[in-house]
Amino acid sequence: MARVKPTILVLGYGNPGRLDDGLGPALAENIGRLALPGVTTESAYQLNIEDAALIAGFDVVVFADATVTGDDPGFFRRLLGRPAAACSSHMMRPEAVVALATEALGFAGRAYLLGVRGHAFNEYEERLSERARRNLRSQAAMLARALEGHAAAIDSFTTGGPIDDSAAACNAACGCDAGEAITAAIEGEP
């Protein structure tokens, strides 16, 4: 009997009209152009409750977002589901989408969070900074290599252990000492 290749979703989210905040959709677009077998790409401005139904149909889900802190080019981590403290139909974190898909729809796949380090967020314009474009190329190439192999090999591309707090990973909004770095990144300081 032939082995069925796992289905993979790359879901990039962010606002392309806020400079580097559009890195998630840009990554999904780059991966989509490769037309990799078994890989579907989607983009959104933000994650919503409906995304739980979307991801439930896949074996592997990669959420892609811009990160305002951390090292270039970004990170790639396994994402664990964690229910939202408060639920909104307007915006959700990826770990809450995973938890909802698991609890309500039987999602039994693996989820990952890919952060692409951005550097310019303080203007309204549809373009990426040069540093963000370099990071995008690097992260897209890494993800393409991971997706071209067997889905079980994706874990070998991760840059750290599993996480269940995307805010802490992407913008350090976890109450830690990253407040100054976030403010500097948003204000456009290096």
Image: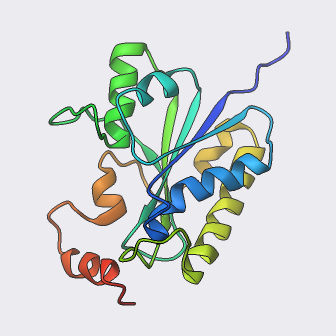
Q: Is residue 138 above or below residue 180?
A: above
The location of residue 57, given as percent across then percent down, is 56, 20
- Is residue 74 left or right of 86 when viewed as pictured? right
Judging depth in this view, the residue of 139 and 5 nearest the camera is 139
Q: Is residue 51 above or below residue 103?
A: below
The location of residue 14, given as percent across then percent down, is 44, 55
Residue at x 50%, y 61% (from the top left corner):
16
Question: Is residue 102 something one can see in this rendering?
Answer: yes
Residue 148 figure quarter = top right
Disc count in the image? Answer: 0
Q: Is residue 41 above or below residue 53?
A: below
Residue at x 29%, y 49% (from the top left corner):
165
Q: Is residue 66 above or below residue 8?
A: below
The location of residue 18, given as percent across then percent down, is 43, 67
Residue 175 figure quarter = bottom left
- Is residue 102 left or right of 115 when viewed as pictured? left
Q: Quadrant of the N terminus?
A: top right
Q: Residue furthest top?
A: 1
Q: Quadrant of the C terminus?
A: bottom left
Residue 27 figure quarter = bottom right
Residue at x 79%, y 41% (from the top left corner):
36
Q: Residue furthest right?
A: 1
Judging depth in this view, the residue of 127 and 42 nearest the camera is 127
Residue at x 33%, y 25% (from the top left corner):
100
Q: Residue furthest bottom?
A: 190
Judging depth in this view, the residue of 84 and 29 nearest the camera is 29
Question: Is residue 159 something one can see in this rendering?
Answer: no
The location of residue 23, given as percent across then percent down, is 53, 62
- Is residue 155 left or right of 100 when viewed as pictured? right
